[in-house]
Amino acid sequence: MTTIPPIIPNRRITGMSAILLPHLDERTVDWDALDAHIARTHAAGLTPAVNMDTGYVQLIDDATRRQVLDRTAEITGGEFVAGAFVNDEAGAAFDLGGYANAALEISSRGGTPVVFPSHGLNSHGDAGWLAGYQAVATEVDCFIGFELGQMFVPYGRIVDAETYTALLEIPQCIGAKHSSLDRMLEWQRLEIRDAQRPDFMVLTGNDLGIDMVMYGSDYLLGLSTFAPDLFAERDRHWETGDPAFFELNDMLQYLGHFTFRPPTPGYRHNAATFMELRGWAGSDAVPEGAPRRPDSDRAVLADIAQRLGVLA
């Protein structure tokens, strides 16, 4: 049985923020808004994470994906992580060459690859998932793993505790994003990490439980793209022991529960609207194929922005 881990006060939190890819319309990226968002995220002290689910990596073409990498590398000086994505189909075999090439595109620009889920990696059981990561380690010197629940993508996989334990035995894997939205599963992973490999980063992807940082998780969140400035402020409060952490965390969590409601991928449209409300983007457009939220969400998001003090 998983036990509740102790709270770890005054801990310096490592924050990685999955960058939304702003659009002017369904087919046109807002490159100026993207550049500014990467820059503000990096300036806030968070590590930009591009070409993730928040960046529509499943929907953009190869040229756009590479341009995102080029711009991110230039803006951050190579201080970023990015999804190493393989675009395959149901029933596909694991594509080691595809992952190796995708990882090289990232590492050659100074970034750290995040092994993004695919049919070939995730659709062959936990043993196949682990074998895939072990194979990646023969080709890639340093990478981050990724458990992603099926509420985000149909080819997601959350592995069992034994498989997760074996992942920590791969030295090239320096951490793993955990996006089950289940805090008990994440507490289990923290327990495994603390017992086996204390330097391994458990990167919470639980946008419904962002207080997981209190228990020893770091984060790679989509929610933080709404407000990297406020997430960085919250993290400083925790490190310094300022009780202002709790009120700010509660309000950010309210934003998370509203925007990450089913269907979960709709959070990206909410993020685009929130960025538009903040003056960070000229449109709340999403690419073709991405779900949109109802127009009524705008008033709720504006109210949350006002409560957070980022909208007059």
Image (cartoon, grey):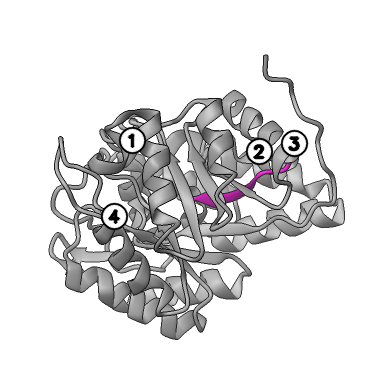
| Dot 4 or dot 3, earlier in sequence | 4
Provide the residue span drawn in magenta. 215-221
Indicate the amino acid at tag 1: Gly
- Whole-angstrom CA distance, mark 4 to mark 3, is 30 Å
| Dot 3 or dot 2, earlier in sequence | 3
**Could you say which disc has been placed on residue 96 in the image?**
4
Of tags 3 and 2, the one toward the viewer is 3
SS at mark 2? helix
| Dot 2 or dot 4, earlier in sequence | 4
Q: What crowding class fits label 2: few (fewer than 14 Cα within 10 Å), some (14-19), or many (20 or more)?
A: many
44 and 303: which one is in front?
44
Disc 1 designates what residue?
156
Q: What crowding class fits label 4: few (fewer than 14 Cα within 10 Å), some (14-19), or many (20 or more)?
A: some
Of tags 3 and 1, the one toward the viewer is 3
Image side of residue 187 versus residue 274, left or right: right
Tell whether position 217 is magenta: yes
User: Residue at left 24%, top 59%?
Assistant: 98
168 w.r.t. 58: above or below: above
- Whole-angstrom CA distance, mark 3 to mark 1, is 27 Å
Residue 48, position as x, y percentages in the image: 49, 66
120 w.r.t. 104: above or below: above
Residue 205, position as x, y percentages in the image: 51, 43
Marks 3 and 2 in Cβ contact (< 8 Å): no
Residue 36, position as x, y percentages in the image: 43, 77
Disc 3 designates what residue?
195
222 and 219: which one is in front?
219
